[in-house]
Image (cartoon, grey):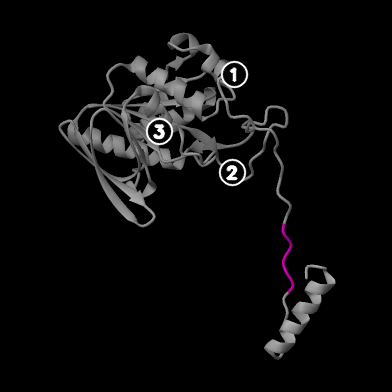
Amino acid sequence: MEIVVCVKQVPDTTEVKIDPVTNTLVRQGVPSIVNPFDVNAVEEAIRLKEKHGGKVTVISMGPPQAKDALKECLAMGADAAILISDRAFGGSDTLATSYTLASAIRKLGKVDMVFFGKQAIDGDTAQVGPETAEHLGIAQVTYVAKIDVEGDVVRAQREHDDGYEIIEVKLPIAVSVVKSINEPRFPTVKGLMKANRAEIPVWTANDLVVDENRLGLKGSPTKVLKIFTPTHRTQGVIIQKDTAREAVAELFQKLSDAKII
Protein backbone atom coordinates (compact mmCIF):
# COMPACT_ATOMS: atom_id res chain seq x y z
CA MET A 1 0.00 0.00 0.00
CA GLU A 2 1.40 3.38 -1.04
CA ILE A 3 0.49 6.02 1.55
CA VAL A 4 1.24 9.75 1.51
CA VAL A 5 0.86 11.99 4.56
CA CYS A 6 0.72 15.77 4.13
CA VAL A 7 2.07 17.58 7.17
CA LYS A 8 2.52 21.23 8.04
CA GLN A 9 5.02 22.99 10.27
CA VAL A 10 3.12 25.51 12.41
CA PRO A 11 4.13 28.17 14.95
CA ASP A 12 4.41 26.81 18.50
CA THR A 13 2.78 29.86 20.03
CA THR A 14 -0.57 31.48 20.66
CA GLU A 15 0.92 34.90 19.89
CA VAL A 16 0.30 35.10 16.16
CA LYS A 17 2.00 37.99 14.36
CA ILE A 18 0.89 39.26 10.96
CA ASP A 19 3.03 41.03 8.37
CA PRO A 20 1.19 44.35 7.83
CA VAL A 21 2.33 44.52 4.20
CA THR A 22 1.52 41.01 2.95
CA ASN A 23 -1.13 40.16 5.58
CA THR A 24 0.52 36.74 6.03
CA LEU A 25 1.87 35.01 9.14
CA VAL A 26 5.29 36.07 10.40
CA ARG A 27 7.24 32.84 11.01
CA GLN A 28 10.77 34.19 11.47
CA GLY A 29 11.97 33.89 15.05
CA VAL A 30 8.96 31.83 16.12
CA PRO A 31 9.56 28.21 17.30
CA SER A 32 7.76 25.65 15.18
CA ILE A 33 6.27 22.19 15.62
CA VAL A 34 4.54 19.57 13.50
CA ASN A 35 0.84 20.40 13.37
CA PRO A 36 -0.61 18.21 16.18
CA PHE A 37 -3.43 16.76 14.05
CA ASP A 38 -0.88 15.80 11.40
CA VAL A 39 1.05 13.75 13.95
CA ASN A 40 -2.06 11.58 14.35
CA ALA A 41 -2.24 11.25 10.57
CA VAL A 42 1.38 10.05 10.44
CA GLU A 43 0.72 7.55 13.24
CA GLU A 44 -2.34 6.10 11.50
CA ALA A 45 -0.46 5.80 8.21
CA ILE A 46 2.38 3.92 9.92
CA ARG A 47 -0.10 1.58 11.63
CA LEU A 48 -1.71 0.73 8.28
CA LYS A 49 1.72 0.09 6.76
CA GLU A 50 2.61 -2.21 9.64
CA LYS A 51 -0.64 -4.13 9.14
CA HIS A 52 -0.84 -4.28 5.34
CA GLY A 53 2.71 -3.57 4.19
CA GLY A 54 3.78 -0.81 1.81
CA LYS A 55 5.45 2.56 2.17
CA VAL A 56 4.70 5.84 3.96
CA THR A 57 5.94 9.05 2.35
CA VAL A 58 5.57 12.33 4.21
CA ILE A 59 5.47 15.61 2.28
CA SER A 60 5.35 19.19 3.43
CA MET A 61 5.13 22.51 1.64
CA GLY A 62 7.06 25.24 3.40
CA PRO A 63 10.40 27.01 3.96
CA PRO A 64 13.69 25.09 4.34
CA GLN A 65 13.27 24.78 8.12
CA ALA A 66 10.23 22.57 7.52
CA LYS A 67 12.76 19.76 7.08
CA ASP A 68 12.83 19.56 10.88
CA ALA A 69 9.13 18.63 10.90
CA LEU A 70 9.72 15.98 8.24
CA LYS A 71 12.59 14.48 10.25
CA GLU A 72 10.27 14.12 13.23
CA CYS A 73 7.93 12.08 11.04
CA LEU A 74 10.82 9.93 9.80
CA ALA A 75 11.84 9.31 13.40
CA MET A 76 8.32 8.03 14.11
CA GLY A 77 8.63 5.45 11.34
CA ALA A 78 7.79 7.08 8.00
CA ASP A 79 9.87 5.64 5.14
CA ALA A 80 10.56 8.76 3.08
CA ALA A 81 10.07 12.52 3.17
CA ILE A 82 9.94 15.27 0.57
CA LEU A 83 9.97 19.03 1.08
CA ILE A 84 8.16 21.22 -1.45
CA SER A 85 9.81 24.60 -1.20
CA ASP A 86 10.06 27.55 -3.58
CA ARG A 87 9.64 31.30 -3.40
CA ALA A 88 6.86 30.84 -5.95
CA PHE A 89 4.78 29.07 -3.28
CA GLY A 90 4.96 31.95 -0.78
CA GLY A 91 1.65 33.42 0.40
CA SER A 92 -0.44 30.47 -0.80
CA ASP A 93 -4.01 30.23 0.47
CA THR A 94 -5.66 26.83 0.85
CA LEU A 95 -6.53 26.59 -2.86
CA ALA A 96 -2.97 27.28 -4.05
CA THR A 97 -1.55 25.03 -1.32
CA SER A 98 -3.81 22.11 -2.24
CA TYR A 99 -3.04 22.59 -5.94
CA THR A 100 0.70 22.40 -5.23
CA LEU A 101 0.37 19.38 -2.92
CA ALA A 102 -1.75 17.55 -5.50
CA SER A 103 0.90 18.21 -8.15
CA ALA A 104 3.59 16.73 -5.86
CA ILE A 105 1.44 13.67 -5.09
CA ARG A 106 0.92 13.04 -8.82
CA LYS A 107 4.70 13.14 -9.29
CA LEU A 108 5.04 10.32 -6.76
CA GLY A 109 3.03 8.02 -9.04
CA LYS A 110 0.51 5.47 -7.80
CA VAL A 111 -0.87 6.42 -4.37
CA ASP A 112 -3.54 4.47 -2.50
CA MET A 113 -4.19 6.76 0.46
CA VAL A 114 -3.45 10.39 1.28
CA PHE A 115 -3.65 11.36 4.95
CA PHE A 116 -4.15 14.79 6.51
CA GLY A 117 -4.80 16.08 10.01
CA LYS A 118 -8.33 17.47 10.24
CA GLN A 119 -6.99 21.04 10.23
CA ALA A 120 -3.91 23.16 10.95
CA ILE A 121 -3.85 24.98 14.28
CA ASP A 122 -2.60 28.22 12.70
CA GLY A 123 -5.33 28.53 10.06
CA ASP A 124 -8.14 26.25 11.33
CA THR A 125 -9.73 26.09 7.88
CA ALA A 126 -9.86 22.27 7.42
CA GLN A 127 -9.88 22.97 3.67
CA VAL A 128 -6.55 21.69 2.35
CA GLY A 129 -7.39 17.98 2.65
CA PRO A 130 -10.72 18.11 0.79
CA GLU A 131 -9.35 20.52 -1.82
CA THR A 132 -6.34 18.29 -2.49
CA ALA A 133 -8.70 15.32 -2.98
CA GLU A 134 -10.70 17.37 -5.47
CA HIS A 135 -7.56 18.30 -7.44
CA LEU A 136 -6.56 14.62 -7.53
CA GLY A 137 -10.07 13.50 -8.45
CA ILE A 138 -10.28 10.92 -5.65
CA ALA A 139 -12.80 10.19 -2.90
CA GLN A 140 -12.45 11.88 0.48
CA VAL A 141 -13.61 11.26 4.04
CA THR A 142 -13.10 13.93 6.70
CA TYR A 143 -13.07 13.88 10.53
CA VAL A 144 -12.17 10.19 10.62
CA ALA A 145 -11.93 8.62 14.10
CA LYS A 146 -11.39 5.01 13.00
CA ILE A 147 -10.34 3.37 9.77
CA ASP A 148 -10.06 -0.20 8.45
CA VAL A 149 -8.88 -1.42 5.06
CA GLU A 150 -9.84 -4.72 3.45
CA GLY A 151 -8.51 -5.18 -0.05
CA ASP A 152 -9.45 -2.05 -1.96
CA VAL A 153 -12.33 -1.11 0.37
CA VAL A 154 -11.95 1.39 3.20
CA ARG A 155 -14.41 1.53 6.08
CA ALA A 156 -14.16 4.83 7.94
CA GLN A 157 -15.92 5.98 11.11
CA ARG A 158 -16.61 9.67 10.68
CA GLU A 159 -17.02 11.81 13.79
CA HIS A 160 -19.98 14.18 14.29
CA ASP A 161 -21.06 16.38 17.19
CA ASP A 162 -23.98 14.02 17.80
CA GLY A 163 -22.29 10.68 17.06
CA TYR A 164 -20.65 8.83 14.18
CA GLU A 165 -21.40 7.66 10.67
CA ILE A 166 -19.81 4.72 8.87
CA ILE A 167 -18.66 5.28 5.30
CA GLU A 168 -17.36 2.67 2.87
CA VAL A 169 -15.34 3.79 -0.14
CA LYS A 170 -12.90 2.23 -2.58
CA LEU A 171 -9.24 3.19 -2.91
CA PRO A 172 -7.69 5.58 -3.77
CA ILE A 173 -8.91 7.92 -1.04
CA ALA A 174 -7.96 11.06 0.90
CA VAL A 175 -8.60 11.01 4.64
CA SER A 176 -8.41 13.70 7.30
CA VAL A 177 -8.24 12.43 10.88
CA VAL A 178 -9.20 13.69 14.33
CA LYS A 179 -7.02 13.33 17.42
CA SER A 180 -9.12 10.57 18.96
CA ILE A 181 -8.14 8.16 16.18
CA ASN A 182 -4.94 7.11 17.97
CA GLU A 183 -2.19 7.91 20.44
CA PRO A 184 0.97 8.82 18.48
CA ARG A 185 4.10 6.86 19.32
CA PHE A 186 7.32 8.39 20.59
CA PRO A 187 10.31 8.17 18.24
CA THR A 188 12.88 5.53 19.17
CA VAL A 189 16.59 6.32 19.56
CA LYS A 190 17.25 4.31 16.41
CA GLY A 191 14.54 6.25 14.59
CA LEU A 192 15.99 9.60 15.68
CA MET A 193 19.48 8.63 14.54
CA LYS A 194 18.15 7.47 11.17
CA ALA A 195 16.12 10.67 10.73
CA ASN A 196 19.10 12.90 11.53
CA ARG A 197 21.14 11.19 8.81
CA ALA A 198 18.35 11.33 6.25
CA GLU A 199 18.77 13.47 3.13
CA ILE A 200 15.42 15.07 2.36
CA PRO A 201 14.94 16.00 -1.31
CA VAL A 202 13.52 19.44 -2.09
CA TRP A 203 11.11 19.87 -4.97
CA THR A 204 10.68 23.34 -6.45
CA ALA A 205 8.11 24.63 -8.92
CA ASN A 206 10.43 23.52 -11.74
CA ASP A 207 10.19 19.92 -10.52
CA LEU A 208 6.39 19.86 -10.73
CA VAL A 209 3.95 20.01 -13.61
CA VAL A 210 2.13 23.19 -12.60
CA ASP A 211 0.59 26.37 -13.93
CA GLU A 212 2.63 29.17 -12.33
CA ASN A 213 -0.46 31.39 -12.30
CA ARG A 214 -2.01 29.00 -9.76
CA LEU A 215 0.87 29.17 -7.29
CA GLY A 216 1.51 31.39 -4.28
CA LEU A 217 -0.14 34.78 -3.93
CA LYS A 218 -0.85 34.90 -7.67
CA GLY A 219 -2.91 31.72 -7.46
CA SER A 220 -4.69 32.59 -4.22
CA PRO A 221 -8.19 34.07 -4.67
CA THR A 222 -8.48 34.57 -0.91
CA LYS A 223 -7.50 38.16 -0.17
CA VAL A 224 -6.97 39.60 3.31
CA LEU A 225 -8.17 43.20 3.20
CA LYS A 226 -7.64 44.16 6.81
CA ILE A 227 -6.05 42.77 9.97
CA PHE A 228 -6.87 44.13 13.41
CA THR A 229 -6.70 43.11 17.05
CA PRO A 230 -10.11 42.95 18.78
CA THR A 231 -10.57 45.41 21.62
CA HIS A 232 -9.98 43.91 25.04
CA ARG A 233 -13.15 43.43 27.03
CA THR A 234 -13.07 44.75 30.57
CA GLN A 235 -14.65 42.88 33.44
CA GLY A 236 -18.25 43.79 34.16
CA VAL A 237 -19.58 45.32 37.37
CA ILE A 238 -20.71 42.93 40.10
CA ILE A 239 -23.80 44.05 41.97
CA GLN A 240 -24.21 42.72 45.49
CA LYS A 241 -27.31 43.62 47.45
CA ASP A 242 -29.28 42.09 50.31
CA THR A 243 -32.36 41.47 48.20
CA ALA A 244 -33.09 40.79 44.55
CA ARG A 245 -35.30 43.89 44.43
CA GLU A 246 -32.42 46.13 45.53
CA ALA A 247 -30.04 44.46 43.00
CA VAL A 248 -32.50 44.97 40.15
CA ALA A 249 -33.02 48.60 41.13
CA GLU A 250 -29.28 49.31 41.11
CA LEU A 251 -28.81 47.45 37.79
CA PHE A 252 -31.63 49.50 36.25
CA GLN A 253 -30.00 52.71 37.49
CA LYS A 254 -26.58 51.80 36.06
CA LEU A 255 -28.04 50.88 32.67
CA SER A 256 -30.02 54.11 32.67
CA ASP A 257 -26.92 56.20 33.56
CA ALA A 258 -25.02 54.51 30.72
CA LYS A 259 -27.93 55.40 28.40
CA ILE A 260 -28.35 51.72 27.50
CA ILE A 261 -32.03 51.83 28.48
Badge 1 element: loop
Q: Residue at x 39, y 32 (%)?
A: 73
The amino acid type, in three-letter code, at marker 3 is Pro
In the image, 124 versus 9, the foreground residue is 124
* C-alpha distance separating marks 1 and 2: 28 Å
The numbered disc on residue 130 is 3
Q: Is residue 91 visible?
A: yes
Q: Residue at x 53, y 22 (%)?
A: 64
Q: Tell me where residue 177 appears, x and y as whole percent.
A: 36, 42
Asked whether, in this view, residue 29 is left or right of residue 251, the answer is left
Viewer-nearest of discs 1 and 2 = 1
Mark 1 or mark 2: name the one nearer the start of the chain.
Answer: 2
The amino acid type, in three-letter code, at marker 2 is Thr
Badge 3 element: helix
The numbered disc on residue 218 is 1
For label 2, the crowd category at 10 Å Cα-Cα, with few meaning under 14, some 14 to 19 and many 20 or more, is: few
Q: Tell me where residue 129 appears, x and y as whole percent.
A: 41, 33
Question: Based on the displayed image, in which of its 4 quarters is residue 3 positioned?
Answer: top left
Segment colored magenta: 233-237
Q: Which residue is mark 2?
A: 13
Q: From this view, report whether residue 212 is shown above or below residue 3.
A: above
Q: Tell me where residue 69 appears, x and y as whole percent.
A: 46, 31
Most common secondary structure along the magenta stretch: loop
Q: Residue at x 36, y 15 (%)?
A: 107
